[in-house]
Amino acid sequence: MNYNKIYDISIVLDDKTINYPDDSKFYLNWRRKIINNDQVNVSELKISNHNGTHIDSPFHFIEKGKKIEDYLPDDFILNAVVAKIKNKNLITYNEIKNTEIEKGNAVLIKTCNSDYLSNAKKGFNKNHVYLSEEACDFLISKKIKLLGIDYLSVDKFGDEEYPAHYKLLSCKILILESINLRNVPEGK
């Protein structure tokens, strides 16, 4: 791979990080600090595997699905294409059908969700932009390896069927959630 520019698309993980409702919040406790005359700095972390930028592996929804520890680091180094979505409600087939997606790509979806994700004061947005089933089917047909989205879920809030999660993960497509695409341009 030839890297012209590398973007950090992770979000800051701290006590202001937006969480999915009923999920554990990020917690950091300093157990020892040099400033307090301790010999070392030592902290204790408590987090959910859904705090901040994270990957959903098939095991998240499929009992015998592949777990994150079953992947090699190289499995996460992919050519990516960023698709900018203008629809403020739904990621539709019509908006992504002309995206230059190649087999094995990571497809990163940039929506207005980025504005919510970067503003913890607004709290969790129950009306976040999510992936339609038609768009999901299209991405599966393209044989992508990873789908990233700029919010906490690819599915509509409150939809207990989790159609996008089940479809993508059953096809062994990893889901990367809570990514920061605000300064990442559209395209490859």
Image (spheres, rainbow, N blue to C red):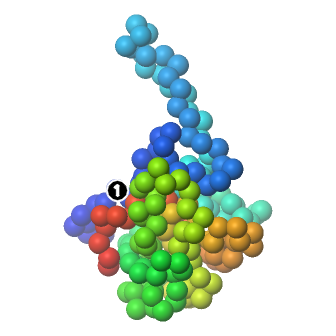
Q: In which quadrant will I find the C terminus?
A: bottom left
- Res 33 → quadrant: top left
Nearest the camera: 137 or 113?
Answer: 113
In the displayed orientation, state which residue is furthest to the right: 63
In the picture, measured across the screen, residue 29 lies left or right of residue 105, that is right
Please state the horizontal and vertical placement of residue 28, each as a whole percent of the image: 52, 31
In the picture, measured across the screen, residue 83 lies left or right of residue 48, that is left
In the picture, measured across the screen, residue 144 lies left or right of residue 63, that is left
Question: Considering only vertical position in the picture, is 37 above or below 109?
Answer: above
Q: Which residue occupies 42% across, 64% down?
A: 114
In the displayed orientation, state which residue is furthest to the front: 122
Please state the horizontal and vertical placement of residue 108, each as a whole percent of the image: 43, 72
Nearest the camera: 143 or 35?
Answer: 35
- Res 174 → quadrant: bottom right
Please state the horizontal and vertical placement of residue 88, each as a whole percent of the image: 48, 77
Please state the horizontal and vertical placement of residue 140, each as a whole percent of the image: 57, 83
Question: Label 1 crowding class (10 Å Cα cut-off): few <14, some 14-19, many 20+?
Answer: few
Q: Which residue is mark 1?
A: 8
Q: Which residue occupies 64% across, 44% down?
A: 24
Q: Which residue occupies 75% across, 69% down?
A: 160
Nearest the camera: 150 or 147?
Answer: 150
Residue 71 visible in the current orientation:
no
Residue 67 visible in the current orientation:
yes
Q: In which quadrant will I find the N terminus?
A: bottom left
Q: Which residue occupies 41% across, 10% down?
A: 36
